Structure formats: C-alpha cells, structure tokens
Image: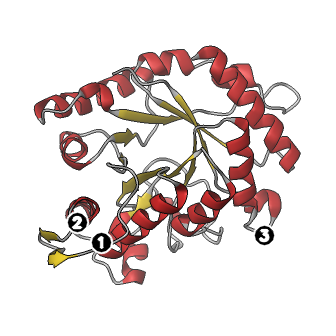
Amino acid sequence: MTQRPQLAVLVSGLHALFGPDLRSFVEVARIADEAGVDQVVLPDHVVMGARTDRYPYGTFPYDADAPWIEPLTTLAAMASATTRVRLGTGILIAPLRPAVLLAKTIATLDVLSGGRVDLGVGVGWQREEYEALGVPFAGRWQRLDDTLGACRALWQDAPASFSSPTVAFESIWCAPRPVQARVPVWFGAKASEALAGRIAAVGDGWYPLGNLSPDELRDGGELMRDAFRAAGRDAAELGVRWQLAVRQDGSGRVDVARTMEPVPALVDAGVTVLSTGINPRIVQTMDDVRAYLDALVAAFAALT
C-alpha cells in the first residue's frame, strides 16, 4: 500500500513568541487543523537538568529553564479545539510513565479525539530526568519494551494479562479502550537492528534522530522494512517522519519554495511524513502562523 505523504508541524518553543500563556499551543493546533496540516506533534521532557551539553544529537536547541508542557495533557486540549488533524508525540519518554497509567491516558485521549492519536516514543537522554522521577536510567530500553507490550495488551484484551521483567498484571480491565483498532506507535532513535526489531514487533513508524542524508534515511528505512518482512508484516505500511529545515529569503521571511525543495527526494527515500516547526525568528504573530501554515500546505500539496 503506497502512503500519501503527510505534513506535520512540531509545536514547541512557543514561549519565545507568546510568553507564559501556553494556551497558544492550542490556538496553533486549531490554525493547523483549519489550514489542512495532517498532524501536530509535541515533544516531551518532564524536567530538565543543567547538563544540556550531553545532548547526543548536536547542540540542544533550548535553555535548561525553558517551559516544557506535558504533551498528553496539551493534546487533550488540542483535541477539543480541532476536528481532523492527528495528534502526535515526538517523542514521549514513555519509560518515565507507569505502563498501565500510560495505556489508560492514551486510550482516553484516543476516545476524546475520535481516534486521532499517534504515539511517538523513545527513552530520552538525560540521566537527571530519570533520577528525579525515581526511575532507573539503566535498563530504560527494556522498560520501554515492557511498557509498550503492556499497552498493546491493555488496548486489545479485556481482561488483559501481561508478564515482563518490569511490568506484570493478570486478568485486569482497562477501559475505555482506544477508538483505533491499532494506535500507531512511532519510535524516535537512530537506526539499528535492535530498533528495527522493536518497530516490527510493536511499532508502526520510525522518527530518525540525527543529521541524516537522503541516502542514510533510505538505508535506515530499508532496515526497518526488512524487519517488517521478517515479522510477516507489510513493509509498505512503515511510516518514516523527517524534519524539514525552514529556509529564509534575503529579507528574513520564510522561503516556502526553498523549504519544500527537498520534499521529492525525501519522499523518494521513503519518508512518509514531512515535519516542520514554528520558528520564532521568522513568525511573530498568530496571523503570521496562519499565513505560514497556509503557504506550507499549498506548496506541499503541489509537490505531492
């Protein structure tokens, strides 16, 4: 099955534009919904330690004291203000949440939104964040595997039973269950055999991290698709999301044509969702946000 490429907007850093009134996140989601954006995505940090220099993917783009809204709470507010746009996390540090509570929260959000949740997950990178929540930093990938396995069991079975090294339960009910027959789960991490196996086992998409070329994206995607085939799944159903760099013209305005220039090559490399952000250096007001998203959607539609 060939997927139609989709356009996503990563909504973060809005405090630099609109100050402490974080309801601006909900307004941006409403504008994105009206503009025809396919997906809004929220990042996640519960707390932030001072050692942002340990960020493994280059320079960390935020100050340590920047506000990080809780994404699932905010997506629920966004659900009430929108009708069609999909609601994603990119990424939620899932091992920081108790597995059963996370399953309940995601299922509730899926019901409230009419089946529009895309759950992007990962393990994060800051030891201090785990320590502050009393969760072991060591073994975080095992905890992620167990958390997602538990969520899948609770979303599918009633009563549900599950047993793993860090999560176990027997014959419990967790209602409501999601509207979607299968909540899409995306993994944010570098490509590896281990990651490919995880996505093939319980996931649906890959959110690559790091500065990758189209060839590297293609190779990573093929690694994931090989794992799908080995697991008896349709490799064409793998989702791959990549972040577009916002380009500017000589006067500092968004150059939509240049921003969208890489799209055909990225789609050819197997990317199914192209994501962009709201850059406070080039977007100043909600009217600017609306004009920017309208222009991006029109340019994206013309290319895809």
Give the side of residue 202 with respect to residue 121, left or right: left
Quarter occupied by the C terminus: top right
Residue nearest the viewer, comparing 85 with 42 = 85
The answer to whether the residue labelled 3 contacts the one labelled 1, judged by CB atoms less than 8 Å apart, is no
Quadrant of res 113: bottom right
N-terminal of the two: label 3 or label 1?
3
Residue 16 coordinates in the image, percent (x, y): 77, 59
Query: Disc 2 vs disc 1: Cβ atoms closer than 8 Å?
Result: yes
What coloring was used for the rendering?
A: secondary structure
- Mark 2 lies on a secondary structure that is helix
Tell me if residue 36 can be seen. Answer: yes
Quick check: 113 left or right of 236?
A: right
| Residue ID for mark 3 | 21
Which residue is rendered at x = 43% and y = 15% of the image?
A: 268
Q: Which residue is mark 1?
A: 99
Please determine whether, in this image, residue 70 is positioned above or below residue 230. Answer: below
Residue visible at 84% across and 49% down in the picture: 286
Name the kind of residue labelled 1 in the image.
Ala
Label 3 – label 1 distance at C-alpha: 31 Å
The label shown at residue 150 is 2
Q: Please, is residue 299 above or below residue 123 in the view?
A: above
Nearer the observer, disc 3 or disc 1?
1
Please state the horizontal and vertical placement of residue 7, each as a whole percent of the image: 58, 33
Does the residue at mark 3 contact the one at mark 2 (Cβ under 8 Å)?
Answer: no
Circle 2 residues within 10 Å: few <14, some 14–19, many ≥20? many
Q: Which mark is residue 134?
A: none
Looking at the image, is mark 3 or mark 2 earlier in the sequence?
Answer: 3
Looking at the rendered structure, the secondary structure element under dot 1 is: helix
Circle 3: residue type:
Asp
